[in-house]
Amino acid sequence: MTPLNIGLLMTYNEADIIGEVLQANASHFDAIFAIDGSTDATPDIIRKYDNVVHLMFDKDLPPGTKINDAVRQFLIDEAQKRYGTEGWFTLLHGDEIFVDDPNDTIRRAEKAGADIINWHVLNFFIHSSQKDINFDDSRPLQDQINHYHPGGIEVRQFKNVPDLRYQPDQIYKVLPHGLKNKPLLDYPILKHYVDRPVHYSTKRYKGVGVVRDAQTNDAGADDRQFKDVLETSKKQVRRYDGAFDEFTPGKRPSFLIQWLRWHRYVAINWGILTPLITLIKPLFGKENSQ
């Protein structure tokens, strides 16, 4: 039996992708608690899903509250009021789609005695090779944006326990206090659509997001949306061709091998372990990019 899985969703101006995200993700959850600060149709789309049992807005927060990771506290408090302290919380972002089944990762974490689950974030972006492609708003973005960087790790799931607390000014730290921080020894994967071919995405991703005009499909005004790389710290750019190779659910190697291979995807300072890592690197195959 799978423990209760409660989604905590934060969104801001993601009407271009939130429907696709929820269509892929919503069925994994017993209940979703959401907070939205959008000026577009994002909340209207969220309301269409029956398991979204609580939707609040930034205007509902106490005066002076800053929108950061800490506002999830309001969602946790409401969820624990309704469901108590059982099961797990899964962090939902409006532009992320799980590849692994979040319920399967919970079952494995329970068996292992873990209370947090780190996910391998595959950051998708619009590659320079796509300059001549006309993006179609009627087609899923997953079918059109196919280049990504492997190598990002972020917590996306943690156990629902008493006294979970975010610090009021907590930002860029998605994990609340009150956990033992024992991780599942695996890196399940999710797809993060950092850049998207919709003109208003620039309201969110200043200097990073896409500025293609959704009506005219005119990208000439700003070719910066087309990139050879999204993050210079990442070593590989891959083109998704229907398979995630060594990251594929059910086909990943042991956690130790995953960890030792991490230097392939991102620059790592191994510190005092550098001589040892240098010595054993050849045992885990050659680095490659696609």
Image (cartoon, helix red, strand yellow):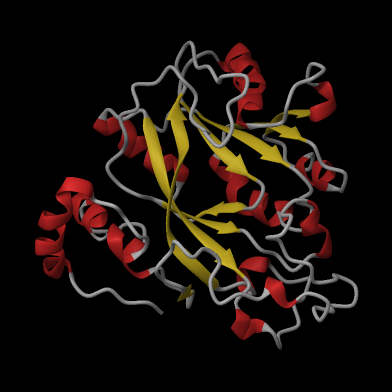
Residue 48 screen position, x and y as percent: 78, 43
Quarter of the image where the C terminus is located: bottom left
Q: Is residue 57 left or right of residue 17?
A: right
Q: Name the foreground residue: 7 vs 36.
A: 36
Q: Is residue 182 above or below residue 121?
A: above
> Would you say residue 276 is visible in this rendering?
yes
Q: Nearer the viewer, residue 290 or 49?
A: 290
Is 288 rendered above or below residue 132? above
Residue 208: give x, y in percent of width and height.
68, 60
- At a point 73% along the width and 77% down the height, the residue shown is 223
Which quadrant of the view contains residue 108?
top left
Q: Is residue 143 above or below residue 21?
A: below
The structure residue drawn at horizontal position 80% and vertical position 46%, both measured from the top left corner, is 42
Q: Residue furthest right?
A: 215
Q: Position of residue 79 (x, y in %)?
A: 61, 20
Q: Please name whichever residue, 239 or 32, is drawn nearer the observer in this view of the structure.
A: 239
Q: How many marks?
A: 0
Give the left or right position of residue 10, taking residue 157 as reference.
right
Across and down, in percent, residue 82 comes to 62, 15
Q: Is residue 173 above or below residue 290?
A: above
> What residue sits 13% from the left and 70% below the top?
282
User: Which quadrant, please, contains the N terminus?
Assistant: top left
Q: Quadrant of residue 252?
A: bottom left
Residue 251: tell me if it is visible: no
Task: Report the side of 130 relative to 252 (left or right).
Answer: right
What residue is rendered at 56% in x and 73% in y? Answer: 146
Which of the 4 quarters of the picture holds residue 37?
Answer: top right
